[in-house]
Image (cartoon, coloured by chain):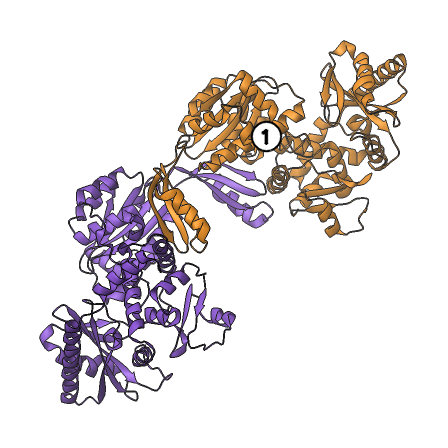
Chain colours: A purple, B orange
């Protein structure tokens, strides 16, 4: 290990490993939550086992970033409605002093903040291994597996890897990020034994990379790839039918790979703590939008009340639908993305090389060989008033020059969003919000209007640079 | 046969079949040319057989459009230089009163006009069938074959077919047209027995259609297609290694096919005699160019002194090179074509949807997986001043937003033609002309400057309509 890297890792460890005082405080808090949940369960006569799971249980949390995950393991013979009724009631009662909120992933759970510490109370079924009834039933087995296999040294390597992923924007399995989960970090360290070894290996990762630490598939990579069609495949040690890396999108995977290469080539603390990024003022961003020789179009929609993962799934889908709409009309879409402060500001960004298209477009018809289709093509275009020239024959196909229906991006968006956009596939919650609350189209400098929102300003600043933050180090 | 078609064909025949007086005049003229060539050959002691070939010999010429082809068959043991020396001398001497001009196809020949009748005196070797030494050696065998197989009725069907092809712009095997030769018309009639049957069959032609009237290949279509990679394959009855339709370009083939369908659907004399086309005034063309929502760019080059088929080959090549240049720079090229009055006005036309490009362009890099290429890509673009944004990762590839080097079509053309354009593949004769005499770039209304030339005005009028002339009937 180069002394430079060594020095950086030691600095990160100093910051990332919880000190004894924090450890005591978090464990005491966890114990209180467990007791409070147990007592509420007894009060409501819910037969359940209450356990501490997640990074606190596994001792892999990063100092100052502890989330306490308490699980309610209920009898697996109970009806699934128990999650929505009794479990929620118990969890809310237990956290009643901390403004508990119902949240939703595979099923509902309860979240609250005690001080700055997030506490999640999550129901699952108490099942034998492999007899999963809900998505969270594996978690206790995960906790158990990791606790068994990680020693103190490896736990700190997990902390280093998590911090590296947070610093490079690749951490987090929720739809918003599509990155690496905590559990995935732990398995990577179990497999590669250290952060440094993980990064070194990542530099050479190939698409469809397979890691199977429990050797469930006995090295049969082809079978694994047939089963899991994802860019990174990490077989769950407690469930051979599951890819722990299923949530990792191509972009996050390859960002992690390229960040690994960059860090090894030119090590810097910035990969772990990118705080050094210079902030750009909102007037600076305004200037850069105006100077940029492209057209940046924002579609602002109002607050949408759905669970956060559902929300991100839907806004990403809307983003894809709008991009496809514009591509279909002939616009050259350079890049798209979606911003949300997860409160009331949601803006879908579509960047085009130009907001106006040429008025004419060359349109290919069928091969002349195909008689019926050719006749239909000629009938359509010969007398049509939007035919500029032709039809003529190029090689063996009919071609015609037409006037475009749409040349202006705002006109396209207005026409297709006027009914909420269901026809182009905008998801129902966003479509409803558009119909009810309206929407706003912001072109270039008009986007400046919302830069008062700090999160949005940061987002646009990163967007305009277009580079992973670590690339500027 | 519908009475409408019947009536049209009778009208065409009345015009196309030569009357006795014309027949006598043409045959007498042919005889005179033969005698004059024979006598010149004797005078220069060239041992040769002089024969009448082509449509006059075969009696398949169209009234008023006779070309007299007289062949000089020389001893096949003579050196090939005899074509360039003795044969030319003899031919020129024979036609000395008619301003004989040397022309060139596979080898040189002599052309002259006696009144309005074109006379070609062409040398070939007197060879046994199959022992071809030059491209014209087959012609006497063709003449003989067609004379043997065509009766009076079929000869008139040939005239109908030739007239149909002339009327629809698909007649002529020279590079300029890339259409159907006279010989090909004769074989089609020998095969299909009548114009009407030829047209009916053509409506159902498929790409790679094979006609083998002498059954040289015994129905082995696959073997034929392996040998001849052309859209229409008509095996030469006197030479199984030759495709009589080799010169037919896709466009002409499919124009003939679609004209056949259109004629059978809605018969009209216009398919044979499109003279009815309304002429557009040059001011009308000017207006249409200006109103058209595209950019029409003309590149005018000066007179080029090369044989006419070489000239057309080269100007088409230059057209393709220029189109590829512009496409490579990101322009959307709608259509290209080349005009020449075969005298001193040559204009290559390139129609673009816009003459200016957006200033930015999205550029894809290598997959992140490829480490060396990725590093090179990042090195290139990270510090480059023409990088607008990025690099970022899309799916598994690097992407970057760049400023374009060229946004204006005139600038591209000027830069790449400044040295004559050899670097982009402009053929040497045209490149030399550009370097010596210069060139002119004409954008939209500037093209109007050359519309005083009637042929060019006609050409632009047809170009702007963009339709085969028969389509407007």
Q: Position of residue A21 (x, y in %)?
A: 14, 73
Q: Position of residue B452 (x, y in %)?
A: 51, 16
Asked whether, in this view, residue B342 is left or right of residue A46, the answer is: right
Instruction: Out of B467 and A105, give the one closest to the viewer.
Output: A105
Instruction: Out of B429 and B244, give the one closest to the viewer.
Output: B429
Asked whether, in this view, residue A248 is left or right of residue A29, the answer is: right
Q: How many badges with numbers are in the image?
A: 1
Q: Quadrant of residue A410?
A: top left
Task: Indicate the chain on which mark 1 is placed.
Answer: B
Residue B37 seen in render: yes
* Farthest-out residue, left: A97
Q: Residues within 10 Å of mark 1 (few under 14, many from 20)?
A: many
Instruction: Out of A102 and B49, give the one closest to the viewer.
Output: A102
Residue A426 seen in render: no
- Relative to A304, say whether B78 is above or below: above
- Residue appearing at x 73%, y 11% in the figure: B99
- Residue appearing at x 63%, y 41% in the figure: B257
Question: In the rendered image, which residue does mark 1 sit on?
Answer: B316
Q: Position of residue A28 (x, y in %)?
A: 14, 78
Q: Quadrant of residue A189?
A: bottom left
Task: Point out the image quarter for the N terminus of chain A.
Answer: bottom left
* Farthest-out residue, top: B97
């Amino acid at each position: 290990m180069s002394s430079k890297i060594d020095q950086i890792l030691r600095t990160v460890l100093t910051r990332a490993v919880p000190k004894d005082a924090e450890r005591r405080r978090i464990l005491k808090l966890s114990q209180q939550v467990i007791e409070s949940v147990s007592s509420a369960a007894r009060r409501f006569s819910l037969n359940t086992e209450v356990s501490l799971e997640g990074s606190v249980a596994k001792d892999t949390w990063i100092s100052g970033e502890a989330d306490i995950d308490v699980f309610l393991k209920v009898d697996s013979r109970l009806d699934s409605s128990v999650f929505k009724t009794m479990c929620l009631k118990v969890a809310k009662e237990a956290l009643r002093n901390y403004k508990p909120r119902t949240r939703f992933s595979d099923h509902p759970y309860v979240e609250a903040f005690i001080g700055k510490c997030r506490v999640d109370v999550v129901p699952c079924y108490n099942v034998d291994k492999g007899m999963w009834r809900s998505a969270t039933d594996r978690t206790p087995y995960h906790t158990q597996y990791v606790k068994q296999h990680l020693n103190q040294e490896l736990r700190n390597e997990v902390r280093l890897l998590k911090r590296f992923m947070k610093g490079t924007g690749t951490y987090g399995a929720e739809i918003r990020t599509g990155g690496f989960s905590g559990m995935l970090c732990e398995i990577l360290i179990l497999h590669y034994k250290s952060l440094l070894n993980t990064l070194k290996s990542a530099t050479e990762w190939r698409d469809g990379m397979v890691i199977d630490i429990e050797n469930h598939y006995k090295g049969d990579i082809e079978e694994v790839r047939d089963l899991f069609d994802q860019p990174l495949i990490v077989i769950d040690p407690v469930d051979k039918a599951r890819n722990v890396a299923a949530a990792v999108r191509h972009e996050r995977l390859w960002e992690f790979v390229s960040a690994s290469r960059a860090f090894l080539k030119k090590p810097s603390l910035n990969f772990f703590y990118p705080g050094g990024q210079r902030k750009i003022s909102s007037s600076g961003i305004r200037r850069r939008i105006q100077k940029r020789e492209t057209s940046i179009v924002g579609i602002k929609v109002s607050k949408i009340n759905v669970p956060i993962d559902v929300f991100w799934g839907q806004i990403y889908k809307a983003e894809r639908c709008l991009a496809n709409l514009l591509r279909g009309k002939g616009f050259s879409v350079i890049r798209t993305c979606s911003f949300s402060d997860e409160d009331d500001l949601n803006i879908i960004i579509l960047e085009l090389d130009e907001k106006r298209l040429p008025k004419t477009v060359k349109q290919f018809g069928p091969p002349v060989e195909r008689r019926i289709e050719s006749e239909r093509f000629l009938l359509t275009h010969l007398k049509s008033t939007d035919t500029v020239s032709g039809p003529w024959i190029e090689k063996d196909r009919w071609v015609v020059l037409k006037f475009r229906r749409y040349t202006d991006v705002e006109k396209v968006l207005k026409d297709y969003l006027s009914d909420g956009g269901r026809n182009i596939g905008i998801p129902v919650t966003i479509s409803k919000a558009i119909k009810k609350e309206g929407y706003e189209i912001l072109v270039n400098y008009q986007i400046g209007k919302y830069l008062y929102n700090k999160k949005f300003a940061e987002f646009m600043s990163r967007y305009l640079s277009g580079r992973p933050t670590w690339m500027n180090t």
